[in-house]
Image (cartoon, rainbow, N blue to C red):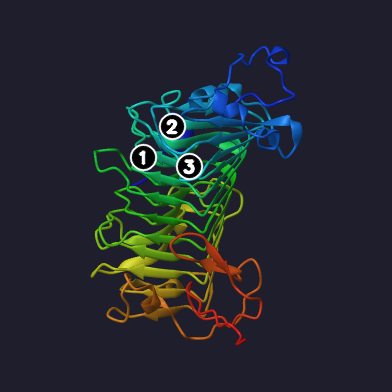
Amino acid sequence: KTPPHPGGGLSTSSLPAGRAPAARPDRPSMRPPACALAVPLAVLLAAGGASAAELRVGPGEAIGRIADAARLARDGDTVLIMPGTYRGDVAVWTQQRLTIRGAGPRPILEAGGEAAEGKAIWVFRGGDFRVENMAFRGARVAAGNGAGIRFESGRLQIENCVFEDNQKGILTADSPTAELQIRDSVFRDAPRDGTPLPHLIYVGRIARFGIQGSALGNGYHGHLIKSRAAYSEVRYNRLDDSPAGEAAYEVEFPDGGVAIMVGNLIVQGSRSSNAAIVAYGAEGAHWPGNRLSMAHNTLVNTAPHAAAFLRIWQDRLPGGVELVTRTNLEAGRGTGLDSLPGEHGGNRRLPPGRFDPARPESLRSDEPAAPLAPPLRPTAQFSPPLGTRTLPAEHRWTVGALQTVRHAPH
């Protein structure tokens, strides 16, 4: 079962040189501590020059609270957050262009029972934002959809971040022009406290969603990824709900749309509450185009009972869906991709007993695969524990997500 789409439940260091407080009446004058006066001017100014500032936040800095930085930051600034745990320091960001970066060891944002606007640890609205090297933990609200990040409109890029033990890791509103991109990040540990369907990532009806080089796992009744976006691209990730996870679907596209999945290792745990690994169209078609393309994925069912490696609700998609699958590797018991109406080629199956999901090398196929054309040809693969590794242009392709890269002798 899947909940209604999120739109129905949403409300919609010191001051840098050359930017005097008198010229910025809405930024209160703050006398920096003596240690901050020693910071070189070059560190305080962002690459764009004196018009863009670097605001340092944390213990011993002129700005101690992230919420204050969210109020003081201006378009084009960089907010640099010092290492540490920030408990209950929630914020709403409304700038037109902003970078927020954790310094050194990843700073931890612990919700501590607080939620900005009753929604999330951080809320983003209307601008072009980039968030790097931050951890979001423990978001809870009474409605059951407390998020590490609530993204409402604009463009948001997430890189090298961790989301754990949140009712929703990232939750977006329905915004037809919004774009969300995630790279090299971790989503894990859905709460087991009665939260209804705690999806690790829940993308509403936005224009574009992409995720790559990321690791997701240990879900509980919700999905690891649920996307209602018009265009979704899921590349080079490890979605692994074994051994103790109890997610429903590993990936779901309930509203159809255009979805591309390339080079993902997807492992469904034996305790899953849904006997399907990837799901498409369960709630009918919302977008004018419905197309699902899957290439070089490794899909694993660890349960002793059969599962559907892909389930499509054809009867709920009156215009039909264009399905293309190429050189995917299936492991375990279940209904294969080739059983569905569509264009298939080069998909293979590893029977039970021929693999161990705890040992990725056992999920590697040596069977050659014909090179595919973009966008289905992988240019990288997931590189444990996080991120991607570029594949050489002359790579010898094999079936599935895990490729063996052969280096030329010196």
Closer to the eye: label 3 or 2: 3
Closer to the chain start, of discs 1 and 3, is 3
CA gap between label 1 and label 2 equals 10 Å
Inspect this view and state whether residue 41 appears.
Answer: yes
Secondary structure under the numbered disc 3 in the rendered image: loop
Provide the residue designation for mark 3.
Answer: 134
CA gap between label 3 and label 2 equals 12 Å
Closer to the chain start, of discs 3 and 2, is 2
Marker disc for residue 178: none
Provide the residue designation for mark 1.
Answer: 166
Provide the residue designation for mark 2.
Answer: 121
> Which residue is pictured at 32% across the width and 48% down the height?
189
> Which residue is pictured at 41% across the width and 44% down the height?
163
Closer to the chain start, of discs 1 and 2, is 2
Quadrant of the drawing holding the C terminus = bottom right
The answer to whether the residues at label 1 and label 2 have Cβ atoms under 8 Å apart is yes
Query: Is disc 1 surrounded by few (<14), some (14 to 19) or many (20+) residues within 10 Å?
Result: many
Q: Is residue 319 left or right of residue 351?
A: right
Dot 2 amino acid type: Ile
| In the rendered image, the vertical position of residue 143 relative to residue 405, given as above or below | above
> Which residue is pictured at 63% across the width and 16% down the height?
27
Dot 3 amino acid type: Met
Secondary structure under the numbered disc 1 in the rendered image: loop
Secondary structure under the numbered disc 2 in the rendered image: strand
Residue 229, x across and y down, in percent: 55, 47
